[in-house]
Image: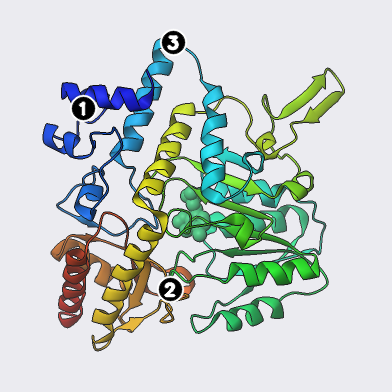
Amino acid sequence: MNRKRFITTIAASGAGALVGSSLLGKSDAAARLAPSGKWATDNWDQVRSLFPLRSEVTYLNTGGLGPASQPALDRVFEQSQTQARIGEHYHKLLAPARETAAAFFGVNSSEIAFVRNASEGNSVISSGLSLKKGDEVVFESHAHPGGSFAWMNRQKLDGVKVKIFEPSSASSEENLERLFDQVTDRTRVIQVSHITATTGLIFDIPAIAAEAKRRGIWFHVDGAQSAGMIPVNLKELGCDSYATSGHKWLNGPIETGMVYIAAERNDEVACSHIGAYSNDEYELPSTLTYVDSAVRHEYGTRNAASVVGLQTAFELQNQIGRQRIADHGASLSQLVLEELSEVKGLEILSPIDPAMRSSILTFRVPGVDCGTVYNGLSREHKFRTRVVTERGLNGVRASWHVYHQETDARRYADAVRSVVAGL
Ligand SMILES: Cc1ncc(COP(=O)(O)O)c(C=O)c1O
């Protein structure tokens, strides 16, 4: 039975709970299923009802973990159950899921490998590129450990030299200048987070890509915070490689992700891990050719159920509208910015320029530990934010996404005002 018919049948029989929707009541399950079998996403109430997120706490940590939607969970459940009944791993489902992912990112499906998380995708690139002692890698000082450790490990293992630059929240030109100030004739790799985990700063990826290309430097983008938050077309961005998680802004199942490698550069990334499905022809003991695509990095038995759950996450985002999602998050973060700009003793750390600002908004209260502010928001007002201790920023971060509305943003601003007044 195909998925559409299956859902329609379930909806008609009112048996939504049987497909893993035990967190939803009957009427909630009906609300998330439009008569056509697609999801109801015309307004943000309908979108919110697609997520089993508890309502007692307002969840503002999508930048850390984006809770899966019920449709994605249902798909994982259905597929896991099928696999358990039949005893097959259903590896064949990775190919159509890859087509969906490729269309989502504007690339060819041969350029995508599914991995377990963004850290693994970043590591595929860092461990696969041919680098010698003294070769240099440059990335921003706000890089998440999932992005920076990949290169610091190569520094430890092979003597590659890691150099960092301080991101500027003032202008993209300044960021270009600061980055390329670190670049020398030994620089082999540039990496930036598309959107930083600390302050939600959006780097000007096409401009960096153009300059990196001109200088013959590999350009890798850590997209953990961008996929699912804003529309991402990788060919338009122009990077050589890109890695992301499925379990943040895409709201896919936990432990999903993908890495993209531009086809023309695929052979420059050696396989650091390998197994069945990495190969084309082989014969023991000496003949082994790789499959002619990035899929060579996707070895051994995979959890097809998680991957098709991620596929559903892509489909749901397509249905909601990717620009609509980006605009919604940005408008809520803008609203909070405007409200908090009035608060005395509070400093906004995210960029003020809307072209550089995203659905993440970070602030700090100078002289007050971010943990104190975090605890006030959490205990007294039931907002789950995230402290930003990286580089001594001492900030509090809120991630605005599809399950939030203007009322949440206004309540949050009120809560911040109240916490700051009580310090
Ligand atoms: C920019 C960035 N890179 C990498 C990661 C690590 O992601 P994952 O846990 O999926 O490996 C994160 C997580 O927050 C991140 O923000």
In whole angstroms, how far apart are the C-alphas of marks 2 and 1?
Answer: 40 Å
The residue carrying mark 3 has its beta carbon less than 8 Å from ligand 1: no
Where, quadrant-wise, is the N terminus in this rendering?
Answer: top left
For residue 86, which numbered disc appears in the image?
3
What residue is shown at x 47% (from left), y 75% (from top)?
A: 356
Question: Residue 311 at what x, y percent from top left?
Answer: 45, 37
* Left or right: residue 386 compared with residue 279: left
Give the residue at mark 2: 357
In whole angstroms, how far apart are the C-alphas of marks 2 and 3?
Answer: 48 Å
Q: Of the residues tagged 3 and 1, which is closer to the observer? A: 1
Residue at the extreme front = 36
Q: Secondary structure at mark 3?
A: helix
Q: Nearer the viewer, residue 284 or 98?
A: 98
Pick whichever of labels 2 and 1 is earlier in the sequence: 1
Q: Amino acid at mark 2?
A: Arg
Q: Of the residues tagged 2 and 1, which is closer to the observer? A: 1
Where, quadrant-wise, is the C terminus in this rendering?
Answer: bottom left
Pick whichever of labels 2 and 3 is earlier in the sequence: 3
Give the residue at mark 1: 11
Q: Nearer the viewer, residue 402 or 418?
A: 402
What residue is shown at x 36% (from left), y 37% (from top)?
A: 72
